[in-house]
Image (cartoon, grey):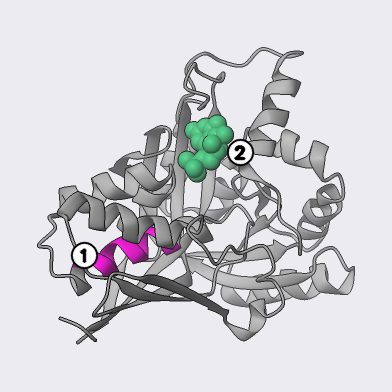
Amino acid sequence: MSGRAVRVRAPGKVNLQLAVGPVGQDGFHPLATIFQAVDLYETVTAVVRDDDQITLAVDAVPALAGSLDGVPLDQSNLAWQAALAVRDRFGVDAGVDLHILKGVPVAGGMAGGSADAAAAVVACTEAWEVGASRADLHELCSMLGSDVPFSLHGHTAVGMGRGDQLSPAMTRGEYHWVFAVRHGGLSTPAVFREFDRLAQASAVPQRPEIDPDVMRALSLGDPALLGRAMSNDLQRAALSLEPSLERTLDAMREADALGAIVSGSGPTVAGLARSRQHALAIAAHVQAVKAADATFCATGPAPGAVILEDG
Ligand code: C5P
């Protein structure tokens, strides 16, 4: 087993809808969300060691070079925690060398860290040959974070509870996205805290619900309808912490995006385009007016975690 290398890829995501209820006693907010995975990927390689050590190294694709500063290289990294969780669950003694190649913007609300966790769960279970079932993988992913199970499954899905209770969504067609990224992310817990602060002055529905217009747009394969229907209850909190994001949303609209929203807890802004060509044009405008540090064009839905190499 020692020296066996398994390489796994897992996608980032955008929330087409993110409805948030009032914070619960457990400190989490009930969510009703619709995720779409996009073809920006994290790639995790697990190489089995002949001792019990765990190591971690992180690189980024060239477009993300310089944005690795906030990425932890110790036990607090979700990929490391994933390896520990797999070892614990299956009583493994062996260690592993983990390598992450980041392709999803860091701390951007696109679940890059969650994709690392999902990919690491799959890579470690495979490399250590523990014989994990699909249910085992899902359970391990749920333990690691609210968005991790979705990165395992991919495509387009409804997420309830903390976002980890998934069911597939009927979708048609391809969706072309532009992501406008900031150096210096927003912390997810901080955005939820700001949501709580703002919620004191306004009514938050007790039970967040899926928007039927978003589901209809997806089942019709109608990007224009989807663009109008997209929503994110965390957007106001993200804008409150980072007011300059309003300029980025405006820049997307100036370039005729079908819709523009903050992605998840931000600060990445997602714009929906009519075509790949239109996505490139929106990205060029956002860059020209200096409304982002970097832009990425991507397409969804994309598959979940996939083993690229095993041996
Ligand atoms: O589950 P995850 O580790 O990604 O969540 C990070 C933080 O985001 C949580 O500790 C919590 O503060 C906040 N959160 C929340 N409600 C959710 C998901 C996350 O308040 N449904």
Q: Nearer the viewer, residue 166 or 94?
A: 94
Q: Nearer the viewer, residue 73 or 173?
A: 73
Q: Amino acid at mark 1?
A: Thr
> Are there few (<14), some (14-19), or many (20+) residues within 10 Å of tag 2?
many
Quadrant of the rendered image containing residue 146: top left
Q: Nearer the viewer, residue 259 or 127?
A: 127
Quarter of the image containing the C terminus?
Answer: bottom left
Q: Does the magenta portion include 93?
A: no
Would you name the residue on which mark 1 appears? 125
Q: Estimate the x, y position of residue 139 in percent, counting from the top left.
A: 25, 44
Q: CA distance from mark 1 to mark 2?
A: 36 Å
Q: Estimate the x, y position of residue 173 in percent, counting from the top left.
A: 40, 62
Quarter of the image containing the N terminus?
Answer: bottom left
Q: Please state if 59 lies on the left or on the right of 250 as rendered.
A: left
SS assignment at label 1: helix
| Residue lying furthest left | 131
Would you name the residue on which mark 2 appears? 231
The residue located at (43%, 45%) in the rendering is: 145
What's the magenta region? Answer: 116-125
Q: Please name which of the two marks, 1 or 2, marks the residue nearer to the observer.
A: 1
> Are there few (<14), some (14-19), or many (20+) residues within 10 Å of tag 1?
many
Q: Amino acid at mark 2?
A: Ser
The residue located at (59%, 64%) in the rendering is: 177
Main SS of the magenta part reads helix
